């Protein structure tokens, strides 16, 4: 797992920075009006460019978080991450490498 972003809550939104080896952007999570149950709860923007979406989730331990998908033409593949609250009211965007799917024998 790696922390690739730090955020603060401002009203209903989250603002912060996402930093990886190829991405360094000021980012904002803006709430959406859901048009269906599967629609995202937030759209993710870097400036005026929409770079992702996020869905509200609850962990097995009852902890609320956002499941985030970031995508951009400069990325080789979408980034899947989770936005969690940490001590002091700040939030961290945590990425971990997906587990490869096993091939059937």
Image (spheres, rainbow, N blue to C red):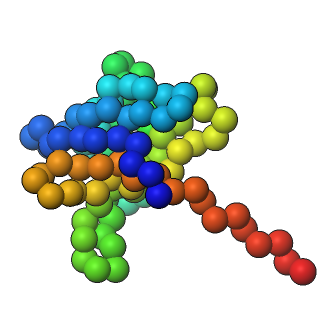
**As drawn, is 71 to the left or to the right of 103?**
left
Q: Residue at x 60, y 32 (%)?
A: 75
Q: Work out whether residue 36 can be spotted.
A: no
Of residues 39 and 30, the one drawn nearer to the viewer in this rendering: 30
Front in this rendered view, residue 75 or 54: 75
- Choose top left, top right, bottom left or bottom right for residue 66: bottom left
Residue 33 appears in which quarter of the rendering?
top left
Residue 4 in the image: state x and y as whole percent: 41, 43
Q: Is residue 78 above or below residue 61?
A: above
Of residues 46 and 26, the one drawn nearer to the viewer in this rendering: 26
Residue 100, percent across and down?
Answer: 70, 64
Q: Is residue 84 visible?
A: yes
Rendered position, 78 above or below 28:
below
Foreground: 39 or 83?
Answer: 83
Residue 44 is left or right of residue 102, and the answer is left
Q: Quadrant of residue 98?
A: bottom right
- Name the quarter where the C terminus is drawn: bottom right
Report x, y in % for residue 62. 25, 77
Q: Residue furthest right?
A: 105
- Residue at the image position 26 percent from the left and 34 percent from the top: 16
Tally the marks: 0
User: Seen from this angle, which residue lies furthest top?
Assistant: 48
Q: Position of residue 44 (x, y in %)?
A: 36, 36
The correct choice, above or below, for 51 with respect to 95 in the image is: above
Q: At 28% across and 57% down in the image, what residue appears?
A: 84
């Amino acid at each position: 797992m790696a922390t690739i972003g730090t955020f603060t809550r401002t009203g209903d939104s989250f603002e912060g920075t996402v930093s990886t080896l190829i991405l360094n952007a000021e980012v904002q999570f803006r709430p959406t009006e859901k048009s269906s149950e599967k629609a995202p709860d937030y759209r993710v923007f870097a400036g005026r460019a929409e770079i992702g979406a996020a869905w509200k989730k609850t962990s097995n331990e009852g902890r609320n978080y956002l499941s985030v998908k970031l995508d951009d033409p400069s990325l080789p593949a979408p980034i899947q991450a989770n936005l969690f609250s940490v001590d002091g009211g700040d939030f961290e965007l945590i990425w971990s490498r997906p587990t490869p799917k096993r091939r059937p024998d």
